[in-house]
Amino acid sequence: MADILFLSDSEFEAYRKLIYTESGIHFTQTNRSILEGRLKECLRQSGMQTVKDYLDKISGNKDEMKMFLDAITTNLTRFFRNQPHFDAMEYFVLPEIIALKKPAGDFSVRIWSAGCSTGEEPYTIAMLLSEKLPINFKFEIVASDLSLKCLITAKEGFYDKTRVVGIPDSYLKKYFDQNESGYRVKDVLKARIRFDYHNLKNASPWKNFDIVFCRNVLIYFDEAAQTAVVNHFWDSMTAKSFLYIGHSESLFGMNTKFEFVKTKWTTLYKKWL
């Protein structure tokens, strides 16, 4: 089985092109070993003997392709990851949105957590909005990911004790039920979030978002795919709205209409028409 551990240059190129076409994710020689390691596991689980046979299998089956893309994606997250982002949301973004909506009699806020992984980000957002929005405001969160396994975990909303580090004690008591093995998100919070599969390569089926979170996802795309994804976000957002990306990511030099915003806590982008 030694021949399946490594891809030849031509095989790597074939997989690289297929992954890019299907998802926009860009594998380079630098992260080739990551693809090879995950492909090895895919072959083991599928019982396929060669990378060519597996390539043929996923190329001709949409469900198999979804499972393959699931296997090669990286899903690192935690509750309240990058706290300054949430500080900016509490003290800058939400006041701006509330001030815009009140005069129009619009008391709803829509948020998209794009690339939500196992759910820590949308649940964090839901807790913050539950605490910080005026009582007459309602909110809805759409949380999407390319990984079906991650979405199952997110929908279940159960996390072991090591995963809830960073959640304020008051939030943990209010929004989670504890048992011997961990913590489960209460139904009242789950009800505010819709988890769904979405490939960011495609245009969003959802519209009218006031806030979009897409953090530490763009780094997996090349410049062309990044631009396409960001423009999809623009089309899905309201005329006055905000975009969060990862602290190491930037729209600088990209052909996009978003405006750069520097706050006391962090930087973000806004759509202001």
Image: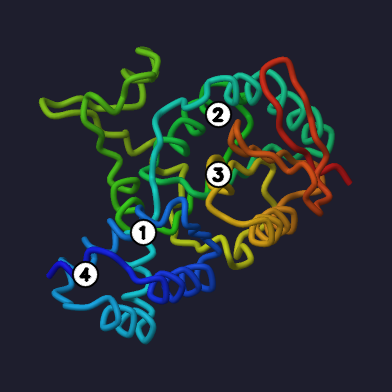
Task: Count residues near mark 2 (Cα–Cα under 10 Å), then give few for <14, some for 14-19, many for 20+.
Answer: some
Gap in angstroms between the C-alphas marked 4 and 1: 12 Å
On screen, residue 94 above or below 206: above
Outermost residue, right side: 273
Where is mark 1, residue-wise? 35
Q: Name the residue type under label 3.
A: Glu
Q: Name the mark nearer the viewer: 4 or 1.
A: 4
Residue 108 versus residue 57: which sits nearer the camera?
Answer: 57
Quadrant of the image occupied by residue 111: top right
Task: Count residues near mark 4 (Cα–Cα under 10 Å), then give few for <14, some for 14-19, many for 20+.
Answer: some
On screen, residue 66 above or below 249: below
Contact (CB < 8 A) between labels 3 and 1? no
Q: Name the residue type under label 2.
A: Leu
On screen, residue 246 above or below 173: below
Q: Which is more N-terminal, label 3 or label 2?
A: 2
Q: Which is more N-terminal, label 1 or label 4?
A: 4
Q: Is residue 62 left or right of residue 104?
A: left
Q: Which is more N-terminal, label 3 or label 4?
A: 4
Where is mark 4, residue-wise? 4
Q: Position of residue 104 (x, y in %)?
A: 83, 39
Q: Is residue 23 left or right of residue 104?
A: left
Identified at 52% across, 25% down, the residue is: 82
Where is mark 3, residue-wise? 140
Q: Position of residue 272 (x, y in %)?
A: 85, 42
Gap in angstroms between the C-alphas marked 2 and 4: 48 Å
Residue 55 versus residue 170: which sits nearer the camera?
Answer: 55
Q: Name the residue type under label 4.
A: Ile
Q: Name the residue type under label 1.
A: Leu
Badge 4 element: helix
Q: Position of residue 41 (x, y in %)?
A: 21, 61
Q: Name the mark nearer the viewer: 2 or 4.
A: 4
What's the mark number on residue 129? 2
